[in-house]
Image (cartoon, coloured by chain):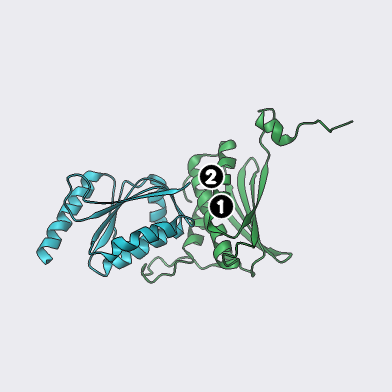
Amino acid sequence: MNNAHKPSAAANFAQGLCPPPRGLTLELHATPEEVMRAVDALRVFGQGRHVAERMLFGLALALEECASNIVNHALQRDARQTFRVTLEHTGSAMVIELRDRGPEFDPTQAPAMAKEANDDDRPPGGRGIELVRCYTDEMQYRREGGENVLRLTRRLAAPTGPK
Amino acid sequence: MPLEIQIQQNIGDRKTGAVTVKLAGSLDTATAPELERRLLPVLAGPVKDLVFDLAQLKFISSAGLRVLTVARKQLKERGGQPAFVNPQPQIKEVFDIMQSLPGVPIFQDLAELDAYLAARQRSHEKTA
């Protein structure tokens, strides 16, 4: 059968002929503007799949924090370097996967923020991880083929606010 | 989503000496440096009360919170402090989670803020 003129899944989605594609992968440069490009893409991706706005807010925040860590620390804001973000809607959860080739770093092992710490003396690093923990159900890390792979999962049936 | 910043002194009938910073949009890793830059001349002056109007702020991350925390620290060193008014629920939630700004007042409307600023002004006049 000749498929030369068969419409793509994306074209069918655009015409409302089939469900939206399950995943989306972005290749991003190590700049803050690219981090926010990923966040904007997440919002559009989630809205297209009817994910609640409050849940999208939390996911956007988690993505912003993790991607900023990659840009600022792993890749040292070197705009020639790139990292990847994959967004996935599994039907029961939203999953965000981040991959970078920076030094090995496992954010899941970052210590919890000390509640009694004097805010003026508290280092800015570590705050973001606390937000990621609050707005996701699972945060999994592995080192694979020289890459840091961080996978954030938020179950869609979960309450929409922080846990 | 960009960030719009409006800095105004003595809005409307208020003669409290406070400076109001209206933020609209997203205070994030890409926009936080711009707020930091715009606050520099404000914090270089004698201001003690800095009011952040957050009614139109839709998103904030730890990069944005860091700028607010630095401003708080600088104001505190001169006996001043920031205040926040009209935060949207998701923004207030982030403040609560981070406990970033302990002791900093957050007001749900301008009437509450006016009463607070008037009291602060009287206090400043007594100590002047």
The answer to whether residue A57 is visible is yes
The answer to whether residue A159 is visible is no
* Element on which disc 2 rests: loop
Question: Cβ–Cβ below 8 Å for labels 2 and 1?
Answer: yes
At x 67%, y 32%, the residue is A13
| Direction from residue A130 to residue B17 in the image, left or right | left
Mark 1: give few (<14), some (14-19) or many (20+) Cα within 10 Å.
some
- Quarter of the picture containing the N terminus of chain A is top right
Which label number is shown at residue A158?
A: 2
B119 shown above or below A146: above
* Element on which disc 1 rests: loop
Camera-nearest residue between B69 and A162: B69
Alpha carbon distance from label 2 to label 1: 8 Å
B111 shown above or below B35: above
Q: Position of residue B1 (x, y in %)?
A: 48, 46
User: In which chain is the residue bearing label 1?
Assistant: A
How many numbered discs? 2
| Direction from residue A80 to residue A158 in the image, left or right | left
At x 31%, y 62%, the residue is B41
Camera-nearest residue between A144 and B82: B82
Q: Colour of chain B?
A: cyan
At x 56%, y 50%, the residue is A37
| Direction from residue B89 to residue A139 in the image, left or right | right
Q: Position of residue A56 (x, y in %)?
A: 52, 44
Q: Colour of chain A?
A: green
At x 11%, y 61%, the residue is B125
Mark 2: give few (<14), some (14-19) or many (20+) Cα within 10 Å.
some
Camera-nearest residue between A109 and A33: A33
User: In which chain is the residue bearing label 2?
Assistant: A
Disc 1 residue type (three-letter): Asp
> Which residue lies under the disc numbered 1?
A137
Q: Position of residue A21 (x, y in %)?
A: 68, 39
